[in-house]
């Protein structure tokens, strides 16, 4: 029980592991990837070298998934499988820790639209991960659509692997949204803005069109994307009549903000607010012995994540009896970063008008192939008013992804308030083969 | 490394994911859905969506974007739901 | 609003079945639930409609009547509501109970013989025939009994179908409304329910709060001994049709159902759903309303399922969920009027069999309410039996 356990080796998790190790505690850092860095610092796994180094006190458990978390006396038990993804044949370990840091990150939010289930429609994160991690371009001619500044580095990554970027479509209007916002946001995010300006100039040099208040409302093709329909959007994101244009592309990448990977935090019963884990200034969650850092607590980029990770690592080490120096700089950075995150959130809201892009036959739940019409019809006819019954009546969210992709959309489309929280409850946090589950774990 | 893709032998690099190998060969889909038999491939690319499921060494429901190839892997298209063979 | 005749507290399967039967008898019914519709025990069950797991006795009688009543009821509702709203994924798939040791084979054989003696179809078949019925079943089977009457339905669909019928007949279903207590007239009879959204006048209230029926009863001043027993289910990823064809369970299931042991018990129950997933149950723990997922419980379920169906070893587990079964100390349902408080009725305590027993339970309650002659002897389920109302303080 003497080690800090950190789940997730992105910017937040690595910083937490470093801080706890520097405070003199042993750390186990668990991550599903083969390399450190997470989504933000994604490394090319084909290269032979690891870019990051960690203090000797940190044991990095790569290619390892935490598939369950349960409370035990004095802390939590972390159930891990290590080996080739999704098994079978991985080895199992269960680790007890009094100080757990969750840094499980976030994934792209995709909004459903007609044709989004066609091969060739990717999330922006997929394009990024494949470009940086595998040197693969998702298409020859690619369109990016969504909202938020993350679309820019993805465009950059696509250019790096030789794709033609047909355009970056920003559904919102960040000029009026962000820059016009008075107060803290701008100055707080100076570093971030510099980084974004860098991407913008690369896109300008490569003559990549950037369009505001525009998005992809439909993808066309028989067995893969052959073209898409773009349209201008009103401020509420309904389509401006007559603005639809057909664009020939072989891939489209979408990203409308991010959804935190909540299952472990939910399994630990951490309190949530607005869909994120609630933490105090020391990154402590509502559950004693559980800390959270990074995108799990709010979307604010790698710098904020790293600052939060450093604080969380120090807090976890302190819980184990270490006496780390107060992470003063990280605390200051985190405060500033959160102001920037709030400004970002305000500048790139997802507007309800996206619901008008859907047709009756548009899939909402990709796994179980539940259409918008079926979802609304079943919920209405049977007067379903809770998330649990909604899932069982419609089957939305009951497939292999367990509502990770469709949960928020289902909640918004049906107006069932607890649906998102119901969908985030996944005691089996990652898939495990029945035979693996049957094995006695090594403690 | 040598791997087989739907029976055809091909080379792969250490550190490639199954999705990386398949996309690198120009494939965009390698699974059909259970309900309507529609093609699927990578969607989220980071292990969240379970759309890129594939059969590896006779075992179905492996996320191609998460699985690193090993020498000798036998990779097959997944047709709907499949039992281990 | 016109005052209802009856308020049913609890919009789960039992409450829905009682409300449906009462409204079919011409009564005005309002169903209340403090949470969402069909979101408690109903949403956590497999949807068993079984005769196979019950020894001869009153519960088996109720189960037989309910097994016959369910398809009739669903057919009638199909006429009344149309096919979409009456869809409940009813499957008369049959059950297969297998033993894998000589001892278990002997007790299974005795159990089945006793069931046959009271008219249950319990066909002892050779292990080879069991393998023909279930191609993926372990070859270590020592004895097998086929129960063609066992069936399955999807509980949330079924409950929402029944509630739709209540509404179609002019009744009301209100979620998010908690019953705080009852009001009484000068004669001491129930005259209404007090809720967090005001008082509703009525002449009777039905406690169909499942595992929470004990606390409901205490709140209205007539405590009963109904307690929660926790159960967990594992769900595999979608598998090809026919992987598991029937409800297949290990003969040790029978012992677990009737047992009062507090410790963890697991016994293997494996069945597929129409969606392609395979459900693996079931565990029984007396841990109050603690809903912590215990991995050792899941491990035990997995171990036994793989022993029964070796092919499942390499299939993914996608989900695990738990729920609370309501049980009375004598493991019999509690159905009928509460003699201590005129106008108070109970329908609860069905443990893990509530889905299967719901159709007959609703009918029995409605018959007792209207004074009709019930098909099932209500005596064993009466509220004022010692196990249910003795030792009130303890509950």
Image (tube, coloured by chain):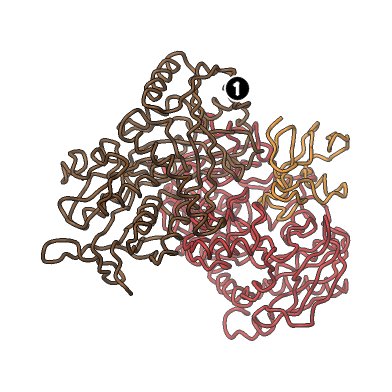
Chain colours: A red, B orange, C brown
Q: In which quarter of the view is residue A243 placed? A: bottom right
Image-based side of C87 in relation to B8, left or right: left
Q: Is residue C159 left or right of residue C56?
A: right
Instruction: Name the residue at 43% across, 47% down.
Output: A320
Provide residue A245's location: percent of width, then percent of height: 83, 76
Q: Is residue A31 above or below residue A379?
A: above
Q: State which quarter of the image contains the N terminus of chain A.
A: top left
Q: Is residue A343 left or right of residue A319?
A: right
Tell me which chain the residue with mark 1 is part of: C
List x then y, in percent, for residue A216: 76, 71
Tag 1 secondary structure: helix
- Residue with the mark numbered 1: C131
Against A250, is C350 above or below?
A: above
C124 to A242, vertically: above or below? above
Whether residue A97 appears in this view of the structure is no
Q: Residue furthest top?
A: C102
Q: Residue furthest front?
A: C373
Q: Which residue is rendered at x = 59% and y = 33% of the image?
A: C244
- Name the residue rendered at 76%, 46% in the picture: B31
């Amino acid at each position: 029980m003497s080690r800090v356990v950190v789940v997730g080796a992105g910017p937040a998790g690595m910083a937490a592991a470093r801080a706890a190790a520097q405070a003199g505690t042993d750390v186990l850092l668990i991550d599903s990837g083969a390399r450190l860095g997470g989504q933000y610092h994604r490394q090319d796994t084909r290269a032979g070298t690891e870019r990051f180094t960690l203090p000797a006190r940190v044991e990095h458990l790569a290619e390892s998934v935490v598939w369950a978390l349960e409370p035990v006396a004095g802390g939590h038990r972390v159930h891990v499988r290590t080996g080739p993804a999704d098994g079978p044949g991985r080895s199992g370990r269960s680790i007890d820790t009094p100080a757990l840091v969750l840094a499980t990150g976030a994934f792209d939010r995709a909004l459903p639209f007609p044709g989004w289930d066609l091969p060739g429609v990717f999330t922006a994160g997929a394009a990024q991960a494949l470009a940086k991690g595998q040197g693969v371009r998702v298409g020859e001619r690619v369109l990016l659509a969504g909202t938020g500044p993350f679309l820019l580095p993805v465009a950059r990554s696509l250019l790096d692997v030789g794709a033609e970027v047909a355009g970056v479509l920003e559904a919102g209007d960040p000029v009026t949204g962000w820059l016009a916002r008075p107060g803290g946001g701008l100055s707080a995010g100076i570093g971030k803005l510099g980084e974004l300006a860098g991407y913008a100039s690369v896109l300008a040099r490569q003559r990549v069109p950037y369009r505001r208040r525009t998005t992809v409302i439909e993808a066309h093709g028989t067995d893969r994307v052959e073209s898409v329909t773009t349209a201008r959007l009103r401020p509420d994101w309904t389509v401006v009549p007559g603005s639809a244009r057909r664009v020939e592309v072989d891939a489209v990448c979408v990203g409308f903000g991010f959804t935190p990977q909540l299952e472990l935090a939910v399994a630990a019963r951490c309190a949530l607010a607005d869909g994120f884990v609630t933490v105090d200034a020391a990154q402590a969650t509502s559950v004693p012995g559980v800390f959270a850092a990074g995108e799990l607590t709010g979307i604010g980029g790698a710098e904020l994540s790293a600052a939060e990770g450093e604080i969380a690592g120090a807090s976890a080490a302190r819980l184990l009896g270490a006496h780390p120096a107060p992470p003063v700089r990280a605390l200051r950075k985190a405060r500033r970063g959160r102001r920037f995150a709030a400004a970002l959130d305000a500048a790139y809201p997802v507007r309800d008008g996206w619901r008008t892009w859907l047709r009756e036959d548009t899939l909402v739940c990709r796994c179980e192939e539940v259409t918008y019409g079926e979802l609304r019809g079943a919920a209405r006819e049977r007067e379903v008013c809770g998330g649990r019954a909604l899932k069982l009546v419609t089957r939305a969210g009951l497939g292999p992804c367990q509502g990770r992709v469709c949960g928020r959309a289902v909640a918004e489309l049906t107006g069932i308030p607890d649906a998102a929280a119901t969908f985030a409850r996944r005691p089996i946090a990652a898939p495990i083969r029945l035979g693996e589950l049957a094995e006695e774990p090594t403690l | 490394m040598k791997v087989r893709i739907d029976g055809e032998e091909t080379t792969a690099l250490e550190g490639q994911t199954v999705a990386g190998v398949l996309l690198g060969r120009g494939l965009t889909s390698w699974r059909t859905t259970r309900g309507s038999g529609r093609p699927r491939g990578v969607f989220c690319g980071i292990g969240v969506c379970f759309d890129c499921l594939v059969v590896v060494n006779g075992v179905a429901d492996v996320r191609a974007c998460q699985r690193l190839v090993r020498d000798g892997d036998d990779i097959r298209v997944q047709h709907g739901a499949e039992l281990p063979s | 609003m016109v005052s209802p005749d009856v308020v049913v507290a609890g919009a789960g399967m039992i409450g829905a079945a009682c409300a449906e039967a009462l409204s079919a008898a011409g009564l005005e019914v309002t169903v209340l639930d403090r949470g969402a519709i069909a979101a408690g025990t109903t949403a956590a069950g497999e949807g068993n409609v079984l005769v196979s797991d019950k020894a001869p006795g009153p519960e088996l009688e109720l189960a037989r009547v309910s097994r016959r009543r369910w398809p009739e009821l669903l057919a009638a509702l199909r006429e009344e509501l149309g096919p979409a709203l009456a869809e409940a994924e009813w499957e008369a798939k049959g059950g297969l109970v297998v033993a894998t040791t000589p001892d278990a084979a002997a007790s299974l054989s005795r159990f089945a013989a006793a069931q046959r003696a009271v008219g249950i179809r319990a066909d002892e078949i050779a292990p080879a025939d069991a393998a023909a019925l279930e191609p993926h079943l372990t070859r270590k089977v020592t004895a097998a009994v086929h129960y063609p009457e066992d069936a399955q339905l999807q509980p949330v669909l079924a409950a929402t179908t029944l509630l739709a019928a209540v509404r179609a007949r002019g009744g009301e279903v209100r979620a998010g409304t908690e019953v705080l207590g009852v009001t009484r007239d000068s004669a001491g009879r129930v005259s209404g329910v007090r809720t967090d959204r005001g008082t509703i006048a009525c002449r009777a209230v039905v406690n169909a709060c499942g595992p929470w029926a004990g606390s409901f009863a205490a709140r209205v001043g007539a405590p009963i001994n109904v307690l929660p027993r926790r159960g967990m289910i594992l769900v595999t990823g979608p598998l090809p049709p026919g992987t598991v064809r029937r409800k297949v369970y290990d003969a040790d299931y029978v012992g677990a159902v009737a047992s009062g042991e507090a410790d963890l018990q697991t016994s293997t129950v494996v069945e597929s759903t129409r969606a392609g997933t395979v459900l693996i149950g079931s565990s029984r723990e007396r841990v109050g309303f603690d809903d912590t997922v215990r991995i050792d419980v899941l491990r035990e379920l997995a171990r036994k399922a793989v022993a029964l169906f070796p092919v499942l070893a390499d299939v993914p587990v996608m989900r695990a969920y738990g729920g609370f079964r309501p049980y009375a100390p004598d493991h019999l349902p509690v159905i009928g009027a509460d003699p201590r408080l005129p106008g108070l009725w109970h329908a609860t305590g069905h443990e893990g069999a509530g889905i299967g027993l719901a159709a007959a339970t609703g009918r029995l309650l409605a018959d007792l309410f209207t004074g009709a002659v019930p098909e099932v002897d209500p005596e064993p389920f009466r509220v004022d039996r010692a196990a249910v109302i003795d030792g009130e303080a303890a509950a």
